[in-house]
Image (cartoon, helix red, strand yellow):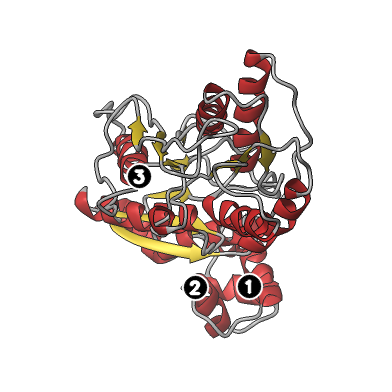
Amino acid sequence: MSDARRRPPSSTDVAALAGVSQKTVSRVLNGEPYVTEEVRERVLAAARELGYRRNTAARALHLGRFHRIGVASIGSSLYGPASLLVALERQARQIGYAFAVAYAGEGAAVTNAVESLLAQGVDAVVISDPIDGDQDLRVDPDVPVLSFRPIPGLDGPRVVVTGPSGVEAGRQATEHLLGLGHATVWHVAGPHRWPAARDRARGWREALAAAGAPEPPAPEGDWSPASGYAAGRALAADPRVTAVFAANDDMAIGVLRALAEAGRAVPDDVSVVGMDDIPAAAYLSPPLTTIRQDFEAIARHGLALLAAEIERSPGEPGEPDLPAHLVVRRSTAPPAKQGREPLCREYSSAPPTTPNTTPPTC
């Protein structure tokens, strides 16, 4: 074998195989803009085929770790994923790691985001908001990975999976409504391709089954108020509907609007529960009963596990579980309420570390 064949591949080799300039290769590997998606994918594919590793990675292996964690995100502006991303950055800096984010579209583009992060130099990768389409995700088995939900095909000794239980959240919301005396609970589901939406729907179904309550059809929304409104219009026209659990607060807001337009009072005629406890939830009319997730605790627990994997030491796992908190406000009440004001209560298996600021009365 010749010396040329034995030498490690260079960026020049990547450029030649991809049919682009070295400058373009540099732009792609540095995550810079002004590169088309087709060219970016071609360069990353060439780098994978050649087994190319940047000199910065080799230098890091020689000198030590990068002390940087990368997050591959679809760039969602939804309250839950955005709040988790902010919490991850805050917690990463608290444990002494820099933070890098690579945004990608849905599905296979997450692989490109991961490749971009590895090319920039990170010690580990977080997949912050997995959805269906990530099944072909490929990550070097030597790179620690944190995911907040299982991703088909992504496994190995250095893959850490943790996160909040959407199943438990869906169960809590449904049990609250059933406990008030409603015969059953209708559900406005999130998009099925999101594991988070499927988990919440599963918790809803399990709670209904445990109570022997019938399972009504569950219209599917897309997390937006508009989709909640569309589902809410159909629900408002059905006199059997007395209780609704929406998979997030934004869709619950749409349901509230549809019920109001149909002349069905909340909670006198219909009780509504959302999820996420967005800042506006406590200020709606009526204030929204919802499920609160502690994103700081989720990020702290996940990064503690990831840091232990980076360090290859047991470490402290942090909180053993990540409970959801049912925050009861005035959008829920027993069916056919006759002038009784529901109490404002908060049920949780553990107090939130960063409670929301709420108005004096809810």
Q: Indicate the position of residue 163 as horizontal and vertical percent values.
A: 45, 36
Q: Which mark is residue 31?
A: 2
Mark 2–mark 3 Cα distance, whole angstroms, equals 25 Å
Q: Which mark is residue 286?
A: none
Q: Mark 1 points at which residue?
A: 40
- The first of marks 2 and 1 along the sequence is 2
Give the residue type at disc 1: Arg
Mark 2–mark 1 Cα distance, whole angstroms, equals 9 Å
Give the residue type at disc 3: Ala
Task: Identify which residue, 249 or 322, lies in the foreground.
Answer: 249
Q: Which mark is residue 299?
A: 3
Q: Indicate the position of residue 178 as horizontal and vertical percent values.
A: 58, 24
| Kind of element beneath mark 3 | helix
Q: Sort mark 2 into few (<14), some (14-19) or many (20+) by Cα contacts within 10 Å.
A: many
Task: Please tell me whether residue 361 is drawn above or below residue 27 in the rendered image.
Answer: above
Q: Give the side of residue 237 with respect to residue 94, left or right.
A: right
- Contact between marks 2 and 1 (CB within 8 A): the answer is no
Q: Give the side of residue 238 with respect to residue 99, left or right.
A: right
Q: Sort mark 1 into few (<14), some (14-19) or many (20+) by Cα contacts within 10 Å.
A: many
Give the residue type at disc 2: Gly
Q: Sort mark 3 into few (<14), some (14-19) or many (20+) by Cα contacts within 10 Å.
A: many
Query: Residue at image x 41%, y 34%?
Result: 324
| Kind of element beneath mark 2 | loop
- Contact between marks 3 and 1 (CB within 8 A): the answer is no
Task: Please tell me whether residue 235 is drawn above or below residue 200 in the rendered image.
Answer: below
Discs 2/3, front = 3
Q: Is residue 107 visible to us here? A: no
Q: Indicate the position of residue 317 as horizontal and vertical percent values.
A: 30, 28
| Kind of element beneath mark 1 | helix
Q: Is residue 251 visible to us here? A: yes
Q: Indicate the position of residue 359 as horizontal and vertical percent values.
A: 28, 54
Query: Residue at image x 67%, y 63%?
Result: 226
